[in-house]
Image (cartoon, grey):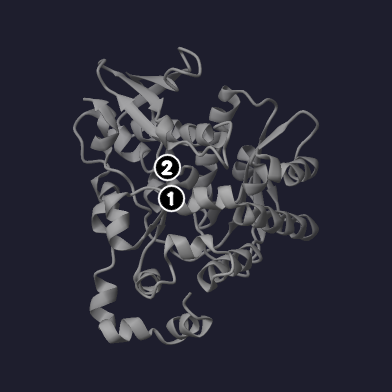
Amino acid sequence: MTSRRKFLTILGGGVVLAAAGAGAFVSTRTPAKALAPWSAAGGYDDRRMQALSYAILAPNPHNRQPWVVDLSKPNEVTILRDKARNLPETDPFDRQLTIGMGCFLEQLAIAASTTGHAVSYDLFPEGEDGPVAIARFRQGASPDPLFGHIMNRRSCKEPFQDRPVTTTPDLEALADIHTDPAETAALRELTKVAFDVEAFTPRTLEESIDLMRIGKAEINANPDGIDLGGAFFESLHIAGMMSKDALMDTDNAGFQQHHAGYLAMLDTTPAFAVIRTQGNTREDQIAAGRRWLRLNLATTSLGMALHPVSQCLQEYPEMAEHYAAAHDMLAKPGETVQMLGRLGYGPDTPFTPRWPLETRLLNG
């Protein structure tokens, strides 16, 4: 095992970078192929492809990008969920993935509005084993003002500024916004203990680590999952500190550094956003995703960042205590808390990788 001293040397002095030529190394670490769908968005003549090129940029659990579309019928898009992209350990009932599909549907509708098209959805027309939705396009929509914030939206996984959050009626119409110091302190502790459960339960940790793409080559080859790119992470990878095997070892310095950094990030959270529903049907989950997407764009419009921290809402046995605590804190009896996110003012963060639209088509 690489020593802690070697790890701290890398952190403190950038020895690997210096030896390799820091400037050249840093400048060539951007996974341009994996980020190309962001620059390709909007570059299609077909109105459906045009809207889809923005929809694929929607947030989704572990960046699994679980959508597949069929364009075989004119004026329609049949939208399916690719079940090969399931998260069976942390999302055993596919609730979070269904919420991610709701984000996709809402971003598709927002993007279609800019070409004057309204989109209506027939949800689960063949039941849960069939398509998630059939989208039908028709003329007659005004541009949705949230469209202008799609390209700036990020899930900011960085510490927030020490700056209070002021809520607005538009945000409160989409979610419960918690800014009370006592409430936010309790939620910070809940999110930390829930993160520990996921991080120290071997099968849930392994699910996340299996989806990590470390360095430019891995990210370009598989532009989904959890990207760990840039000169810093690649330096650790070269030194043997950022391998998947190392990250599975909870005594390893690399794991401990990542773990401590995530907890410190949670401690900077000044506000939380919560989306809850009266029921917990697939339609409720889709609706929650559509609201989450709109909330994400609305907070972006205000210069804020939103980051989902929904580990305590996961439905596997080891998380049951914290799932119950989250519902005691955040929901009325019978309601389901669908999303929990940290809200604040964060730094600019880069685009996340995406599969090209063409790879998500059954036919076209």
In the image, is 305 to the left or to the right of 228? right
Residue 294 locus on image (x, y percent): 51, 40
Crowd tier of the residue under label 2, counting other residues whose Cα lies within 10 Å: few below 14, some 14–19, many 20 or above: many
Provide the secondary structure element on which disc 1 rests.
loop
Q: Is residue 326 visible?
A: yes
Residue 268 locus on image (x, y percent): 63, 66
Residue 248 locus on image (x, y percent): 52, 60
Calculate the distance from the C-alpha at mark 1 to the C-alpha at mark 2: 9 Å
Q: Which of marks 1 and 2 is in front?
A: 1
Placement of the C terminus among the 4 image quadrants:
top left
Provide the secondary structure element on which disc 2 rests.
loop
The residue pinned by badge 1 equals 211
Q: Quadrant of residue 54?
A: top left
- The residue positioned 39% from the left and 23% from the top of the image is 119
Name the kind of residue labelled 2 in the image: Arg
Q: Is residue 340 above or below residue 199?
A: above
Q: In which quarter of the image is residue 336?
A: top right
The residue pinned by badge 2 equals 64
- The residue positioned 23% from the left and 78% from the top of the image is 24
Q: In this view, does 328 lie above or below 160?
A: above
